[in-house]
Image (cartoon, rainbow, N blue to C red):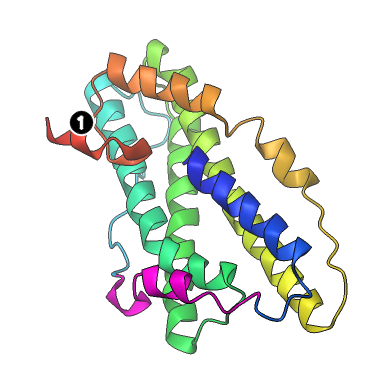
Amino acid sequence: MIRRLFISFLIVFILSACSHEENIHDSDDAENNNLSTEDVKVPSGIFTSEKQNSVIDEEEIRLSIKTYLDSHEELDQASIPFQEIIYEGKELNKNELEKLAKITKLTIENDENFANYIINNTLPDDYKEESERISNYITAYNDILYELGDILTDVTDSATKGEIPKINIGSIMNKMEVVNGREQKKIEEFLDKKNIKTKAFGREDLEKE
């Protein structure tokens, strides 16, 4: 996850610095490496729970964390081909916009559902802090990607008009206090300790063990 955010940041600054270059959006290599958006299937399942004011046992919270993280990973991977098009300064067609909107909607719902679940229920003592860390990390990660998308759109629009783009990454830098290698390491150590197998954080091979 951290690597993907770094690459996204790099793209933003390269586009900003090169906004007046005529061939800024004409990278054949990037185009050839893109997975077709037509091949993307919108994940159907996300984390949901109607429980409130309940005492959650360890077995349930372990499954809840796994479901939340797996759903996040599937949605995150599904969004990549669309974001690559945006990063290239190209426009999504109607079908692509609709599909990306569905992915974004499910991503927001997944984050909100899990956040409400851990806030409105009583978790085992040794799961409360780390469940909050996971929720904050994933939600901030998604927010950063949304904001980077908006920045890239602004950069592209400014370049089209022959203007120098104005980039304000203050909000993103604040979120990076939550989304960083140190926090990810704490989360992964917790997942290992509790033997929670998930696709997230590139741990898909561990999940199969």
Q: Is residue 34 at least partly visible in the picture?
A: no
For residue 78: magenta? no
Q: Which residue occupies the foreground of this view, 130 or 172?
A: 172
Nearer to the camera, 204 or 49: 204
Q: Residue 62, image x and y in percent? A: 27, 27
Q: Which residue is mark 1?
A: 206
Which residue lies at the image location 42% right of the left edge and 50% below the top edge? 110
As for residue 37 lying within the magenta part, the answer is yes
Image vertical order of residue 48 relative to residue 20, above or below:
above
Q: Position of residue 8 (x, y in %)?
A: 58, 53
Residue at 51% in and 38% down: 2
Q: Residue at x 58, y 67 (%)?
A: 87
* Quadrant location of the C terminus in the rendered image: top left
- The vertical placement of 187 against 171, above or below, is above
Circle 1 crowding by C-alpha within 10 Å: few under 14, some 14–19, many from 20: few
Helix, strand or loop at label 1? It is: helix
Does residue 158 appear in the picture of this structure? yes
Q: Which quadrant holds residue 201? A: top left
x and y percent of residue 181 in the render?
A: 53, 27
Give the percent coordinates (x, y) of residue 53.
43, 30
Answer left or right for 106 relative to 159: left
In the picture as drawn, the residue positioned furthest to the left comes out as 209
- Magenta region: which residues? 24-40
Query: What amino acid is at disc 1?
Result: Leu
Question: Is residue 204 or residue 137 the one in the foreground?
Answer: 204
